[in-house]
């Protein structure tokens, strides 16, 4: 998808509604492995299968990872946060003892079925694997090790600022990228409402991008989001009627 120049419009939101809410809590610890990619400055991690584009400006920085098929869940996991520690008891040679890092899922690590799962095909199903940005990986592992066993748990995301809605597409096709979600971090359902329409369900297009096939030009827009832990928020009239494709709008509230 072509990169668009995004004009950030920060709006003061007048009212919001929590329809169903409960705090997201950390999961139990599980075993996986982790490698790294993207270079020492993580520049090679930009873009990716979640659609966040420039991860620096999107607020995710270098603490990110691509997930294997078993974890990526066809993009439903985009935006989720994981705390990762190197399994020092299993690999004391390459693990850094007593350190952990929390990353955001921003990309997909594709399987390589031409290689065995224990020798290069690290992201082959059914393996649970994190291909982390190099700066994040080096917080828990020694560079020359390349791959380390890890323990991980899904944890609540902590975000600065509000939820962001980036509107791409064209007439009769709104492709809305949703980012910077706290709590669960990821979305299971989304709806859109124009100032002249009723609520309309959106469908996941790819990654964190959700689509609507309505003509909504010239209308103010509202969104309703349900995260993957069942919390639902409405964002009334967060987009003014003079919006344009390529713009980003931010809420004044978080999950």
Image (spheres, rainbow, N blue to C red):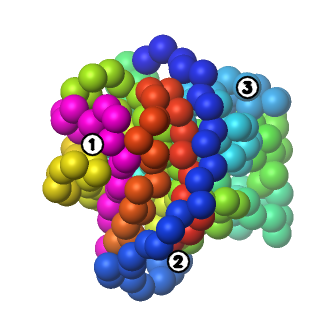
Quarter occupied by residue 147: top right
Mark 2: few/some/many CA within 10 Å (<14, 14-19, 20+): some
Place of residue 92 in the rendered image (x, y in percent of width and height, measured from the top left) = 78, 58
From which residue to which does the magenta span run? 207-230
Depth check: 91 or 143 in front? 143
> Which of disc 2 and disc 3 is earlier in sequence?
2
Identify whether 225 is placed above or below 171.
below
Mark 2 or mark 1, which is nearer to you?
1
User: In the displayed image of the protein, which residue is found farthest to the top?
Assistant: 2
Residue occupied by mark 3? 43
Note whether residue 158 is visible: yes
Number of the label disc, if any, that sits on residue 204: 1
Taking the spot 45% from the left edge, 36% from the top edge, the residue there is 242
Kindly identify the residue that appears in the image at 32 percent across and 21 percent down: 170
For this orientation, the residue located farthest to the bottom is 22
Q: How far apart are marks 3 and 1 (CA)?
A: 27 Å
> In terms of secondary structure, where does tag 1 sit?
strand
Mark 1 nearby-residue class (10 Å; few <14, some 14–19, many ≥20): some
Residue closest to the eye, 185 or 31: 185
Q: What residue is rendered at 54% in x and 46% in y?
A: 249
Answer whether residue 226 is magenta in the image: yes
Q: Distance between the residues labelled 3 and 2?
A: 30 Å
Q: Please name the residue that numbered disc 2 is placed on.
A: 26
Task: Please indicate, yes or no, whether residue 108 appears anywhere in the rendered image.
Answer: no
Is 246 on the left or on the right of 162, as rendered?
left
In the rendered structure, the answer to whether residue 67 lies left or right of residue 46 reads: left
- In primary-sequence order, the first of circles 3 and 1 is 3
Q: Where is residue 8 in the image (x, y as percent from the top left)?
A: 63, 38
**Contact, mark 2 vs mark 1 (Cβ under 8 Å):** no
How packed mark 3 is, by other alpha carbons closer than 10 Å (few <14, some 14-19, many 20 or more), is some
Whether residue 63 appears in magenta in the rendering, the answer is no
């Amino acid at each position: 998808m072509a990169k668009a120049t995004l004009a950030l419009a920060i709006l003061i939101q007048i009212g919001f509604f929590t329809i169903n809410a409960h705090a997201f809590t950390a999961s139990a610890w599980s075993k996986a492995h982790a490698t790294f990619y993207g270079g020492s400055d993580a520049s090679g991690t930009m873009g990716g299968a979640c659609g966040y584009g420039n991860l620096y400006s999107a607020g995710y920085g270098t603490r990110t990872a691509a997930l294997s098929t078993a974890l990526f869940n066809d993009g439903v996991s985009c935006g989720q946060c994981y705390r990762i520690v190197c399994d020092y008891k299993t690999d004391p040679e390459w693990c850094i003892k007593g350190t952990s890092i929390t990353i955001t899922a921003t990309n997909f690590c594709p399987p390589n079925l031409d290689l065995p799962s224990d020798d290069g095909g690290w992201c082959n199903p059914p393996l649970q694997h994190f291909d982390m940005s190099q700066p994040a990986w080096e917080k828990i592992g020694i560079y020359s090790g390349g791959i380390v066993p890890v323990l991980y748990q899904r944890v609540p995301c902590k975000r600065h600022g509000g939820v962001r809605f980036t509107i791409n597409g064209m007439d009769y096709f709104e492709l809305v990228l949703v980012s910077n979600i706290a709590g669960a971090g990821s979305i299971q359902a989304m709806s859109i409402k124009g100032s002249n329409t009723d609520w309309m369900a959106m469908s996941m297009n790819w990654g964190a991008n959700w689509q609507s096939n309505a003509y909504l030009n010239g209308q103010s827009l509202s969104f309703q989001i349900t995260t993957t832990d069942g919390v639902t928020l409405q964002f009334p009239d967060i987009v003014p009627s003079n919006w344009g494709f390529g713009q980003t709008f931010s809420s004044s509230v978080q999950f």
